[in-house]
Amino acid sequence: MGPTLRAARALVLLAGFYLLGLVLLAALAAADWAAAVHTPGAFALKVFLVSAVLALPIVRGMFMLRTPPQEDVPGVRVDESREPRLWQTVRDVAQQVGTRAPDEIVLTGDVNAAVSEDSRLLGLAGGTRRLRIGLPLMTGLSESGLRAVLAHEMGHYGNADTRLAAVSERGRVHVLRTIAHFEERADAKVSKERARQEKKAASAVAKGRKAKEVDTTGTGITYRAMARLYTAYGKFYLRATLSGSRRAEFAADVAAARIAGRDATSSALREIPVIDAAHDFYLNCYATLGVDAGLLPPPGEFLGGFRHLLAARHEELDALRGELPTEPVSPYDSHPPIAERVARIEALPDDGRASDPVRPSLSLLADADRSFAAVEETVLTPAALGLRRLDWPELVHAAMSVQTERSAQRFGALALGTAGGEDTSPHGTDGGGGTPGHGADARPGADADRTSRPEADPEGAGAGAGTLGALLDAIDAGALWRIAERLPRSAEAAAAHGRAAREFARPQLRAGLSQLVSAEYLRQGRARWQLSWAESAVLELPYGHVDELPAALEAAVADRPDTGPLRALLEPVAAPETSVPAQAPAPGPTA
């Protein structure tokens, strides 16, 4: 379907919204006329009032012509003097597609590329064109892959998708806004009726009478009936416009294959879901790891550190590339499933461009580090920007130490019966150990309170040291299995007795005791968390302890507990010991 037919269809669908409003207003007017002619004056007055109340949301929806402005995506606008190679690449691709290049390029902090256009006169006249490119997307794509993505986006310009989107978007906004008006009025009427009945019931109770149950069934039914009419049209409208959006995506893919090559386009489509998943993992387990401790990576590394993860985990990512994501298909999807898009591209004839040189797309930037730092300033919240910055090795050690200490304190409080009632299982979500852990989100919309927590709690650290000693003393006093009864248990574990109960409890006791021991090593300065981009963070223990610690923990939770080996390992030494990296018994879950 060409741009002219698509424009005509969009205008017809938009006109359908106004036609529905006119039909409903005509029906209300007919009801008013019938009431005035055939009913008594009091009843006719009620009909007039109901008609006026129902007509107001219809008229508001029809004549509120302004479409709400789109939410601005945080990013940095770059001109040609700052990024000449990127601008030249975009212009070359636009010329090959046969369309006008964008007027603005904005670098963002998400795994996405998108185009928009400030069209006028319902899309009949073009306007300022804007291209948004995510730095994380560029981090994961080669230069040929980025060219395929750019060709896809320029294809949207060439097919007039961005201009015609204004008409479709206006129709969607008007329909949804009208539905919202009716629903709001129905909810307000239900609330008013509920309040009236509750007041009446309270009065009856005060007089010693039995109160009637509050029942708002049927209240606001006329508003909801009108909302259902618009909802039915809205569903039809969305199905029609979004099916066009999916066809536009296929057409843009074909343009990308024509310009960048079949294999480069297919590879880029396969790569984007992998980059997206890896970036989510990076944000959760690395970039925001230290937020709870008041820490962030160095300027530019919040976004730029993603490069280290991609370089270190290429084998894992290769496995992901082999399997395309399976997505549920809905008639309300704006994009086709990625697997279908890849299949259509790979079904095209071979164009012989499979051996194009592969360079990282970040090489198109004049200074990638500077760009990462600049975009980071727009992506992070003001509270996050005020956090202390540490290099990655120091950040991982400090953040994981705080997590380990907090996890140990919670387990100790639960084991000794001093917990405040929260779930303090050693298998909780923010224990230490594992891949640098699930950090708090420091991006816009995140809880700002979480970014102001202290880096560590000295008093809590001292309490943690006392907790371990008290727990070992309790074990020596024969209280191990009474302690186990305080830990969270499954229904099967709670029903067990004797040796079976001990076997259920032993792994949990050992894990919790490992948390306390790891915290004590860190407190003494005899252990250190080591950064690893390729696997879980590693707790470096004193020389020889990695072999002795598992046996000492087993002895402490044996049927006849013996804390002696554990106490011997934890005895501070006069001279510093040589440490070797080793995966310590994890004091918490592995991400």
Image: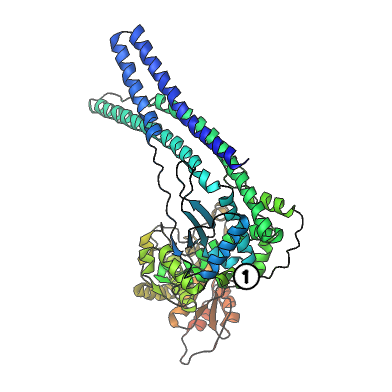
Query: Is residue 165 found left or right of 409 in the rendered image?
Result: right
Which quarter of the picture shows residue 259?
Answer: bottom right
Whether 353 is drawn above or below 533: the answer is above
Tally the numbered discs: 1
| Residue 412 seen anywhere in this rendered image of the structure | no
Q: How far across and how far down the image is residue 549, in percent?
A: 56, 78
Asked if residue 244 lies left or right of residue 48, the reply is: right
Which quadrant would the C terminus be assigned to in this image? bottom right
- Residue 109 location (% of width, % of height): 48, 63
- Residue lying furthest bottom in this view? 575
Residue that numbered label 1 is attached to = 313
Amino acid type of the residue tagged 1 in the rendering: Arg
Q: Position of residue 376 (x, y in %)?
A: 44, 67
Q: Nearer the viewer, residue 297 or 69?
A: 69
Question: Can residue 89 be seen?
Answer: yes
| Quadrant occupied by the N terminus | top right
- Image: 2 above or below 63: below
Scheme of image coloration: rainbow
Q: Quick one: SS at disc 1? A: loop
Residue at 38% over, 18% down = 29
Along the horizontal axis of the image, is 318 left or right of 372? right
Q: Is residue 257 above or below residue 46?
A: below
Mark 1 Cα within 10 Å, few/some/many (few <14, many 20+)?
some
Identify the residue shown where x is 68% and y is 53%: 342
* Residue 444 image-quadrant placement: bottom left
Q: State the residue in front, 144 or 8.
A: 8
Residue 569 on image: x %, y %: 52, 82
* Furthest residue toward left: 207
